[in-house]
Image: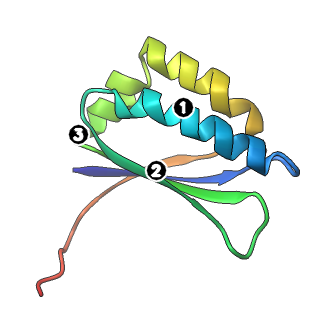
C-alpha cells in the first residue's frame, strides 16, 4: 500500500466552495483502479489549509493509472483552480506497524 499525502492551500474565502467541489470530485478518485481510501482534513490553525491522504494499492495506480486518465482531467477541472500555491504531492510507504 502507498500513501499519497498532499498539503493543500485553498484561496482565501473559497473554503466552503472547495469542500463542496471536493465532495463531488471524491466520486472520481474512488472509482479508480487501485484506489483504497481517501480523507480530507481541515487545518485547525491555518485558514484554508487542508491535508489530503489517499491510499493506493501501488504507486503506479496513482502516478499512471489515475494521473494519466481522463478521470484525472475531470478531477483537475473541479479542483485545481482552488489552490494557491499549487500543491506538491508526496508518496509514502509504511515502515513499521504498531503491534497491540
Q: Tell me if residue 46 comes above or below residue 61 in the rendering.
A: below
Q: Which class describes the residues within 10 Å of circle 3: few (<14), some (14-19), or many (20+)?
A: some
Q: Which of marks 1 and 3 is nearer the N terminus?
A: 1
- Calculate the distance from the C-alpha at mark 3 to the C-alpha at mark 2: 14 Å
Q: Given the current orientation, which residue lies at the most extreme right position?
A: 13
Relative image position of residue 92 (x, y in whole percent): 34, 56
Q: Residues within 10 Å of mark 2 (few under 14, many from 20)?
A: few
Q: Position of residue 90 (x, y in %)?
A: 46, 50
Seen in the picture, residue 79 relative to 48 is either above or below; the reply is above
Mark 1 vs 3: CB contact within 8 A: no
Residue 85 seen anywhere in this rendered image of the structure: no
Mark closer to the observer (1, 3): 1
Residue 25, numbered circle: 1
Mark identifier at residue 90? 2
Disc 1: CA contacts within 10 A as few (<14), some (14-19) or many (>=20): some
Q: Which of 26 and 76 is in front in this view?
A: 26
- Taking the spot 45% from the left edge, 27% from the top edge, the residue there is 28
The numbered disc on residue 58 is: 3
Which residue shows up at 82% across the image and 45% down it? 14
Residue 27 is drawn in which quadrant?
top left
For marks 1 and 3, give the CA distance.
Answer: 21 Å
Q: Is residue 27 left or right of residue 98?
A: right
Looking at the image, which residue is at 38% across and 31% down?
63
Q: Is mark 1 on a helix, strand or loop?
A: helix
Residue 13 vs 51, above or below: the answer is above
- What residue do we see at 77% from left, 50% from top? 15
* Near-viewer residue (59 or 44): 44
Amino acid at each position: 500500500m502507498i500513501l499519497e499525502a498532499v498539503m493543500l492551500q485553498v484561496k482565501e474565502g473559497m473554503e466552503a466552495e472547495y469542500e463542496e467541489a471536493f465532495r463531488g470530485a471524491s466520486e472520481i478518485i474512488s472509482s479508480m483502479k487501485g484506489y483504497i481510501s481517501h480523507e480530507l482534513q481541515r487545518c485547525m490553525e491555518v485558514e484554508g489549509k487542508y491535508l489530503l491522504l489517499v491510499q493506493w494499492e501501488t504507486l503506479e495506480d496513482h502516478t499512471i493509472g489515475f494521473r494519466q486518465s481522463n478521470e484525472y482531467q475531470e478531477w483537475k477541472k473541479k479542483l485545481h483552480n482552488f489552490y494557491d500555491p499549487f500543491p506538491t504531492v508526496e508518496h509514502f510507504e509504511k515502515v513499521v506497524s504498531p503491534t497491540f
